[in-house]
């Protein structure tokens, strides 16, 4: 009879130990890649709903552009809508090369690096970012990946 309390204690302790959740890294990597593509590909059809679904819609969002332009927060980000939605702006195509994605061991954060060609027209004239270094950080929120920070830069040749 003395073994019963010991057995129950072992079961209770074993049940209280947190179980490490299994993360399908390849599945998460594909979802992150889809999010990255949506964050630039939305412009082809001017699909703001798609864009706003893949970036952090709060004050934590940060975007750094070549030069000295820094966008802090979702409200500031939305101020560019007039430009993007203007009939003078037309997204032509984009290409992402050398995409490297890392998923955190906990599966709730990811970061990436790639080279981006973003080919556009403004009033019929080229408005391109070519050979642009693009890095960023994503968080998994409410079971979906959102970009919380991204940085664009041009190499000095």
Image (cartoon, grey):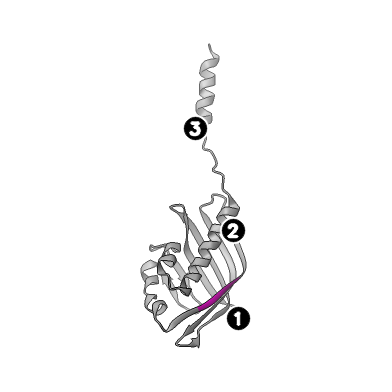
Which numbered disc, 1 or 3, marks the residue that appears first in the sequence?
A: 3
Which numbered disc, 1 or 2, marks the residue that appears first in the sequence?
A: 2
Q: Is 87 or 151 nearer to us in this picture? A: 87
Residue under the point 58% across and 49% down: 24
- Which quadrant: the C terminus? bottom right
Q: Position of residue 112 (x, y in %)?
A: 57, 63
Q: Which residues are magenta?
A: 92-96
Give the label on residue 156, or none.
1
Res 70 quadrant in image: bottom left
Q: Position of residue 88 (x, y in %)?
A: 42, 84
Q: Answer with left or right where residue 130 lies relative to residue 70.
A: right
Magenta span dominant secondary structure: strand
Magenta segment includes 79: no
Element type where label 3 sits in the image: helix
* Nearer mark to the viewer, of 1 and 3: 3
Q: Is residue 4 above or below residue 127?
A: above
Element type where label 1 sits in the image: loop
How packed mark 2 is, by other alpha carbons closer than 10 Å (few <14, some 14-19, many 20 or more), is: some
Residue indicated by mark 3: 16
Which numbered disc, 3 or 2, marks the residue that appears first in the sequence?
A: 3
Q: Is 141 or 92 nearer to us in this picture? A: 92
How packed mark 1 is, by other alpha carbons closer than 10 Å (few <14, some 14-19, many 20 or more), is: few
Q: Position of residue 119 (x, y in %)?
A: 54, 79
How packed mark 3 is, by other alpha carbons closer than 10 Å (few <14, some 14-19, many 20 or more), is: few
Element type where label 2 sits in the image: strand
Could you tell me if the residues under marks 1 and 3 are in contact, i.e. CB atoms within 8 Å? no
Residue indicated by mark 2: 102
């Amino acid at each position: 009879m003395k073994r019963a309390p010991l057995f129950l204690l072992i079961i209770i302790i074993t049940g209280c130990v947190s179980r490490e959740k299994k993360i399908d890294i390849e599945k998460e990597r594909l979802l992150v890649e889809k999010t990255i593509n949506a964050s630039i590909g939305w412009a082809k059809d001017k699909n703001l709903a798609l864009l706003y679904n893949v970036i952090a819609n709060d004050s934590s969002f940060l975007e750094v552009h070549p030069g000295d332009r820094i966008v802090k927060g979702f409200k500031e980000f939305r101020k560019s809508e007039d430009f993007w939605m203007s009939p003078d702006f037309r997204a032509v195509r984009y290409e992402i090369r050398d995409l490297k994605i890392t998923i955190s061991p906990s599966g709730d954060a990811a970061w990436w690096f790639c080279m981006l060609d973003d080919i556009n027209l403004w009033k019929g004239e080229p408005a391109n970012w070519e050979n642009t270094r693009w890095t960023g950080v994503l968080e998994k929120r409410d079971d979906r990946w959102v970009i919380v920070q991204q940085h664009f830069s041009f190499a000095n040749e």
